């Protein structure tokens, strides 16, 4: 569950990992919120990231869990394919097209697009639609900050995202079962919610390629497929945009894809989940409504039937 401004130590304050050294002093309360860790973007600028009240207290998965068990179909459909093949992806230079109903459209160099965004560490629960889960210490900034910078026009109701198409570096793109690019979308109020981040790193380091370098979306109350990786286009649009899994299997994957233990996938239950790395004999955990972020996001869906808008 999200943390409040509490005074207790968190796992990362006491974890003997050199990356956390900048804030391993015994920080409490407001001091914890102000504590900083130095991280680097691929563009090589050293940046400060602050801890966040939105982080969960749960202990994160190991770096090897997070970087060895992935879904990134541009590199193949196996869980190990991204770790095997993504190192061949060129992530610098990287540019992002911002277009549609926006005041300052353009093709932005990534470093320019993110340069004034305050980086935070957000330790988030992550729940895949396949019923496995992890806890991941992302480094990122609120998508709202980026959208405010480029200026959202009043007619915009949704944000659409696209991943890079580069078959020569993304061997999975030789298969056509997905109509590339991988696409995702959010309603504008979901995109502006403070829990919604653009992540540029994890575990205090630049984003590993297999996790969506150099920049990917993270929406912690939705199934993981919404958290699109290696983004090259952000479009502000008036209509609900097409999204990859909904295009492939509309009866199985909706646009909203909010984590919901009461709405099963047609082929399996969503009531519980397997925590990756929890050991062969560990029990399954109950899946939480909105993945544990109900207090923060339920109001976004007031009046909607989430069994219909799944
Ligand atoms: N983004 C792109 N471009 N391609 C993908 O195949 N897979 C999604 C999502 N983002 C995917 C993607 C799915 S199904 C999940 S569960 C998460 O990425 C996995 O993120 P992780 O590998 O960092 O855990």
Image (cartoon, rainbow, N blue to C red):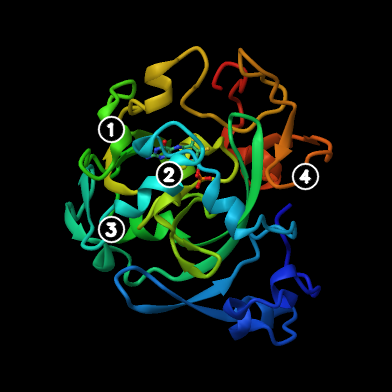
The residue labelled by disc 3 is 91
Closer to us: 90 or 34: 90
Q: State which tag comes first along the sequence, 2 or 4.
A: 2
x%, y% of residue 268?
66, 18
Between the C-alphas of marks 2 and 4, the distance is 23 Å
Callout 3: few (<14), some (14-19), or many (20+) C-alpha neighbours within 10 Å?
A: some
Residue 24: name its quadrant. bottom right
Between the C-alphas of marks 2 and 1, the distance is 12 Å
Closer to us: 86 or 34: 86
Cβ of disc 2 within 8 Å of ligand 1?
A: yes
- In the image, taking residue 257 as reference, residue 89 lies left or right, namely left
Closer to us: 44 or 107: 44
Establish if 19 lies above or below 300. below
Q: State which tag comes first along the sequence, 2 or 3.
A: 2
Residue 40: name its quadrant. bottom left
SS at badge 1: helix
The residue labelled by disc 1 is 173
x%, y% of residue 289?
71, 35
Between the C-alphas of marks 4 and 1, the distance is 33 Å
């Amino acid at each position: 569950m999200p943390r409040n401004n509490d005074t207790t130590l968190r796992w990362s304050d006491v974890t003997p990992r050199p990356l956390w050294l900048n804030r391993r002093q015994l920080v409490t309360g407001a001091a914890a919120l102000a504590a900083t860790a130095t991280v680097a973007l691929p563009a090589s600028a050293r940046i400060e990231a602050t801890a966040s009240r939105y982080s969960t207290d749960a202990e994160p998965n190991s770096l090897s869990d997070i970087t060895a068990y992935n879904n990134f179909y541009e590199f193949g459909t196996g869980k190990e394919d991204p770790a095997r093949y993504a190192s061949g992806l060129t992530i610098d230079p990287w540019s992002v097209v911002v277009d549609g109903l926006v005041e300052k459209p353009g093709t932005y160099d990534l470093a320019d697009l993110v340069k004034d965004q305050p980086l935070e560490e957000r330790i988030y629960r992550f729940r895949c639609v396949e019923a496995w889960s992890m806890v991941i210490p992302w480094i990122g900034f609120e998508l709202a900050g980026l959208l405010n910078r480029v200026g959202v026009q009043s007619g915009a109701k949704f944000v659409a995202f696209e991943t890079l198409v580069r078959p020569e570096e993304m061997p999975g793109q030789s298969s056509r079962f997905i109509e590339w690019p991988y696409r995702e979308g959010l309603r504008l109020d979901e995109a502006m919610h403070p829990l919604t981040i653009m992540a540029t790193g994890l575990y205090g380091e630049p984003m590993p390629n297999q996790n969506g370098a150099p920049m990917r979306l993270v929406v912690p109350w939705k199934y993981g497929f919404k958290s699109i990786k290696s983004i090259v286009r952000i479009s502000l649009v008036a209509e609900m945009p097409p999204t990859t899994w909904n295009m492939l299997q509309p009866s199985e994957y909706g646009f909203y894809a909010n984590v919901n233990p009461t709405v099963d996938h047609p082929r399996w239950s969503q009531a519980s989940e397997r925590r990756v790395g929890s050991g062969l004999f560990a029990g399954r955990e109950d899946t939480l409504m909105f993945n544990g972020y109900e207090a923060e996001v339920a109001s976004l869906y007031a009046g909607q039937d989430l069994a219909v808008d799944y």
